[in-house]
Image: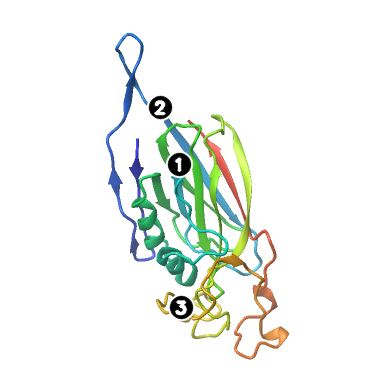
């Protein structure tokens, strides 16, 4: 069964799609309904002053990945990493035949706070999880995990995943008031022009005005180390 589920948040509409329920037959010709697996994806912000954008969450099979280190970001990932909007990232996932279900979180996740996304799909030991969110007081930093197997989690069991910071590589990290969209600056979010090296990498952290970056509106409170967040994946059915 493939379900594509969306939410309306921060002015963005995530697509809603549904597909027919698949079923099998036993040796006597009877119909065996496919069982649903329900996962709770709870993300907690571990930074001191980096709100996270609403979480984009995808359950899929192998053959889909949200990003790869050393390769160019998709337009959807660029939009998420520069402006915090998960719409295009989730729409891109929904167009992949290996994706089973998508959803977006309920809103911005403040430091120390958590949000939970519920994803329901046909059970399979091969199910994998991809999720992503922007560190909004940055130019194009994001965090998340991609292509992590969750189909082996038993009912009533949980798994903790620590999330590291990544640089989408699509924007210069000038930390300027005009280019950082979070509350520290209120600048521009997504810009289709790509101005930097244009490949995903680990993020080295913000420099800030306290360390002498003349263009920066950030201060030491906006710095972050790895991990920046954690996810608890719990299967409840």
User: Residue sitting at 42 percent across and 79 percent down?
Assistant: 193
Q: Residue at x 71, y 84 (%)?
A: 210
Q: Which residue is mark 1?
A: 61
Q: How far, Cα to Cα, is label 3 from label 2?
A: 44 Å
Mark nearer the N terminus (2 vs 1): 2
Label 2 residue SS:
loop
**Residue that sits furthest to the bottom in the current view:** 214
- Mark 3: which secondary structure? loop
Q: Is residue 84 visible from the viewing direction of this image?
A: no
Q: Is residue 60 visible?
A: yes
The 10 Å Cα crowd at callout 1, few under 14, some 14 to 19, many 20 or more, is: many
Classify 10 Å Cα crowding around label 2: few (below 14), some (14-19), many (20 and above): some
The answer to which image quadrant residue 167 occupies is bottom right
3 and 2 marks in contact (CB < 8 Å): no
Q: Is residue 225 left or right of residue 108?
A: right
Query: Where is residue 165 shown, x and y percent of the image?
Result: 61, 63
Question: In the image, which is nearer the foreground, mark 3 or mark 2?
Answer: 3
Q: Nearer the viewer, residue 106 or 125?
A: 125
Mark identifier at residue 35: 2
List the residue tagged with mark 3: 194
> Local crowd at mark 3 within 10 Å, few (<14), some, or many (≥20)?
few
Give the quadrant of residue 213.
bottom right
């Amino acid at each position: 069964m493939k379900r594509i589920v969306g939410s309306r948040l921060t002015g963005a509409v995530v697509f809603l799609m549904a597909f027919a329920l698949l079923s099998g037959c036993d040796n006597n010709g009877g119909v065996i309904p496919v069982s649903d697996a329900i996962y709770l994806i709870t993300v907690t912000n571990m930074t001191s002053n980096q709100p996270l954008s609403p979480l984009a969450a995808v359950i899929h099979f192998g053959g889909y990945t949200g990003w790869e280190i050393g390769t160019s970001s998709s337009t959807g990932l660029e939009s998420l990493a520069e402006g915090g909007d998960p719409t295009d990232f989730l729409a891109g996932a929904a167009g992949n035949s290996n994706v089973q279900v998508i959803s977006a979180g309920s809103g911005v996740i403040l430091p120390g706070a958590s949000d939970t996304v519920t994803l329901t799909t046909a059970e399979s030991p091969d199910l994998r999880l991809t999720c992503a969110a922007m560190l909004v007081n940055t130019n194009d930093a994001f965090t998340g995990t991609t292509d992590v197997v969750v189909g082996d989690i038993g009912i009533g069991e949980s798994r903790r995943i620590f999330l590291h910071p990544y640089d989408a590589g699509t924007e210069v990290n000038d930390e300027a008031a005009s280019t950082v969209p979070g509350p520290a600056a209120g600048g521009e979010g997504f810009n289709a022009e790509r101005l930097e090296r244009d490949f995903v990498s680990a993020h080295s952290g913000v420099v800030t005005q306290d360390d002498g970056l003349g263009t920066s509106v950030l201060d030491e409170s906006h710095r972050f180390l790895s991990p920046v967040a954690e996810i608890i994946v719990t299967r409840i059915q």
